[in-house]
Amino acid sequence: MFAEKYLQKDNRKALIDVQPKTECEIIVVIPCFREPDILQTLESVLHCEFPKSNVEVIILINHSETEDEKTKSYNLETKRKIENWISESSNPKIDFYAVGPVELQKKWAGAGLARKSGMDEAVRRFDLLEKPNGIIVSLDADTLVEKNYFVEIENYFTRNPKHVGATIAFQHQTEELESKHLEGIRLYEKYMNYYKMALEYVGYPYPMFTVGSAFVVKAGAYVKRGGMNRRQAGEDFYFLQNLVQVGIVGEIKSTKVFPSARISDRVPFGTGPILQKWMKGEEDLTRTYNFKAFMDLKSLFNVKHNFYKTEKKLFDEIINTLPESVQRFIEEDHFWNEVSDLNKNCSTSDSFQSRFFHKFNAFKILKFLNFAHGQFYAKEDLETQFQTLNNLSKIRH
């Protein structure tokens, strides 16, 4: 039992009392809170080409223990509709389970805990099958998938058996969006591409899209990483950026998911709230991080090898040759303490340079960018910054 200790934490109880089929190697987890279009998602999943293995789909209907009665009733009705749909949609290759409604602890209720509850149940079921390489798929209740979705997920891990997870290509749904809404989602997708490309260009080894409806993880790696976090938003970002410390997280480009571009205020940040601010004129998606700030980061990453087994005095001398934004950030962030800690625990320069990005990780990069734009740079036109980066990337390749 690879997950026994993990599952014993918090006395996690089984949510499904039916034994998983021995042929099951893929489990899809769909959190569902007040979702009007969940049946469209389930239809999309049902009509996929099926892989060699069997598939399970766990729909985790959830709400806070303090949720209003209207929402609780809505979720109960959703469960009834899903169960009726399941009874009419049988296929020997796939099993659907409508779980809940699960009442989430008020303090943590939200997207993170809902996703975690469903993924923990997937782990439990793979543990019963003794399959640490079982694949847990994260999907959302407003997302559609391509017909080759399962086949390409299975193919990816057949080709890359040592990888612990992967992100999946995505494209937001744009049908019937009015012009400003459509412009907003296209700008947001361009920003996401710009940000990922910029991280890759400056030498960050783990650039990736972090979209809750578009990633997969092996059950054993999920356990090793400590499971999904309970954040009310951004749980996917934190999970995936920590997962890279467990092993290789790749990218599946041969299939695609189609998340909704709906406007929402359910979570503090993410696509929904950003689009809502854009529609209200409170967020300007035509502007983004100045590429010069990324180039400042590149200057730091280019000299990281010089920090191996270095003394504080030499470290300061190297830092003082870098752009002022980096100098100030390194000082205010007390990054020397983290470099010193790395040197105590790394016996080779290669291991130091690899683990350097466990310290100067995606969270710290975002912190630096916000710091730099607070004191040194103004945000610039997205299209201009994107083209600048694109041209430099072409030259380099």
Image (tube, helix red, strand yellow):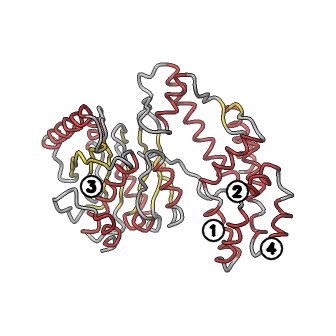
Task: Tell me the distance, in whole angstroms, between the alpha carbons under discs 4 and 3.
Answer: 54 Å
Tell me the amino acid under the disc marked 2. Answer: Asp
Q: Are marks 4 and 2 in contact (CB under 8 Å)?
A: no
Which sits in the foreground, 330 or 251?
330
**Corner quadrant of residue 145:** top left
Report which residue position mark 2 lands on.
333
Residue at 46% in and 68% down: 162
Q: Are marks 1 and 4 in contact (CB under 8 Å)?
A: no
Residue 152 location (% of width, % of height): 39, 52
Report which residue position mark 1 lands on.
355
Looking at the rendered image, the disc whose residue lies closer to the viewer, 1 or 4, is: 4
Residue at 27% in and 50% down: 57
Q: Secondary structure at mark 2?
A: loop
Q: Secondary structure at mark 3?
A: strand
Task: Tell me the distance, in whole angstroms, between the alpha carbons under discs 3 and 2.
Answer: 46 Å
Tell me the amino acid under the disc marked 4. Answer: Glu
Residue 55 is labelled as: 3
